[in-house]
Image (tube, rainbow, N blue to C red):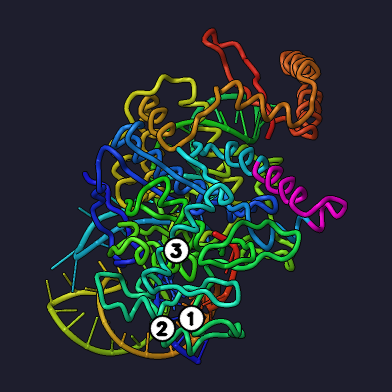
Amino acid sequence: MELRLYDTLSREKRAFVPLDAKHVRMYVCGPTVYDFAHIGNARPVIVFDVLFRLLRHLYGEAHVKYVRNITDVDDKINDRAARDFPGLPLNEAIRKVTELTGKQFHADVDALGALRPSVEPRATEHIGEMREIIERLIAGGFAYAAEDHVLFSPQAMNAANSTLPRYGALSKRSLDEMIAGARVDVAPYKKDATDFVLWKPSKPGEPSWPSPAGIKAEGRPGWHIECSAMAWKHLGEQFDIHGGGIDLVFPHHENEVAQTCCAFHQQRMANYWMHNGFLQVESEKMSKSLGNFITIRELLADWPGEVLRLNMLKTHYTSPIDWTMKSLEESAKTLNDWYRFAADVAPSKPAASVVDALLDDLNTPLAIAALHGLRNSSDAVGLSASLRLLGFLSESVAQWEGRKRQASGVDAGEIDRLIAERTAARARKDFKESDRIRDELAAKGVVIKDGKNSDGKPVTTWEFA
RNA sequence: GGCCACGUGGCGGAGUGGUUACGCGCCGGUCUGCAAAACCGUUUACUCGGGUUCGAGUCCCGACGUGGCCUCCA
């Protein structure tokens, strides 16, 4: 079977053919580092990690390059820096915010079982590339300088009548619609309402760099140009896959396409555009005002990262997810069973049923159904290998179980003593006492399981619920 | 207002022009002093109204509903 991926640009599922099979290239828009990442931010991280792992499986680890940027220059960062470190010079405060948030982000996504991308470029380290693209766009007649800003003109792009794509092709909207639907006040320096910023002047104290286009005042880049520059630097003028959240289709990705294609005079930027769907929390839109804004870190306090990962992958990446406690409990139960059954088993090759499901546009729900199939047919080595392909089973069973014991804070010796007492009570048929002890343990969150060993003697094991 | 997605059983959630999704739950059984756990088994579906077709939950049209985007929100 071949890999097929849904491409937002062509609106169809197509066979994936890399430009260079020895060098498969993927770019995903990463975080703007100004605050803790929320559970919605975790979705593209997990989804594209699965794709990264699948591509490595198919083409070899050495032949896949995955770039996910870190946006470390942005208004929200500036605001946060001024708020959190009012005593510091702004640039220093900004560095603190981006370093701290970046570290938090890495800790969070590591816990989710996501591999680090091949490269994690920072916007501030690619100002030179941004300036070069801007200069090219001006030279090509696609951009102009006005009042210390540089603006991109979609009108000019569509008037060029060359091999360039049409502006609006990715998000399926025409310039006329955009003009008609524009809700924002148009800045006076814009020649046209649809023009967007490539470069803008910095306010005093803000991060600033020498400007392109002969502009004397120092400035800073617009958001869209960052990704064009970083993708170009690390993946070239054209590459295979570009991913991100569905909300980025317009304007961010539309503008990336415009910048990159006009700068390098080409038909396409990426051959496959992939977008993950949104996430709701308990059937409501996640927002700070509703008070249901939930960070990855908060969830990690209550659940192992792999539970969050499984919960995320139960839904196809393009569909909306309703993130609920009930669903998390279900995911935890499933993973407990898989851990006990397959975690300490040496893996064979991933099962064809699982790989085939992933090959069909990353159909993770179908892959999970295939995992259940392996479990039901008692194929422990196949399940072990398949789960590892999907980024699970990073721990041994003992570590997995121990994590729950640790979190509960109950003394294991005390538990063992109570269980011994109960076993004695049962032996003398004092069931009132044995049930009392069982209730006492249950009150501590300890669930006991009665069984028999190979000699037929009763054995009681326990775990935390 | 404009553009774009989606609507499957108690719940989550795939798939597909004509045969079981799968998981959780429920129910029944085995086991147990009784439970729990485990194991075995069973159950229920395709928003509504038209149309195409020998046949549609699956294709087309419409209605209703939900969600996303509309210049820096994954």
Extreme residue toward the top, this view: A455
User: Which residue is found at the position 58% from the left and 82% from the top?
Assistant: A189
Helix, strand or loop under label 2: helix
User: Which residue is found at the position 35% from the left and 28% from the top?
Assistant: A382
Helix, strand or loop under label 3: helix
Q: CA distance from mark 3 to mark 1?
A: 20 Å
Which amino acid lies under the numbered mark 1 shown in the image of this protein?
Thr
Q: Does the CB distance between marks 3 and 1 fall below 8 Å?
A: no
The residue under label 2 is A175
From which residue to which does the magenta span run?
A82-102
Q: Residues within 10 Å of mark 2 (few under 14, many from 20)?
A: some
Q: Is residue A425 visible?
A: no
- Which tag is nearer the camera, tag 3 or tag 1? 3
For disc 2, the chain is: A
Q: Is residue A95 magenta?
A: yes
Using residue A105 as the reference point, say whether residue A10 is left or right of it: left
Q: Does the CB distance between marks 1 and 2 fall below 8 Å?
A: yes
**Sequence-first disc among 3 and 1:** 3
* Relative to A407, residue A219 above or below: below
The residue under label 1 is A194
Q: Does the CB distance between marks 3 and 2 fall below 8 Å?
A: no
Using residue A354 as the reference point, say whether residue A345 is left or right of it: right
The residue under label 3 is A135
Q: Nearer the viewer, residue A386 or B38?
A: A386
Q: Nearer the viewer, residue B13 or A206?
A: A206
Which amino acid lies under the numbered mark 3 shown in the image of this protein?
Glu
Q: Nearer the viewer, residue B54 or A12?
A: A12
For disc 1, the chain is: A
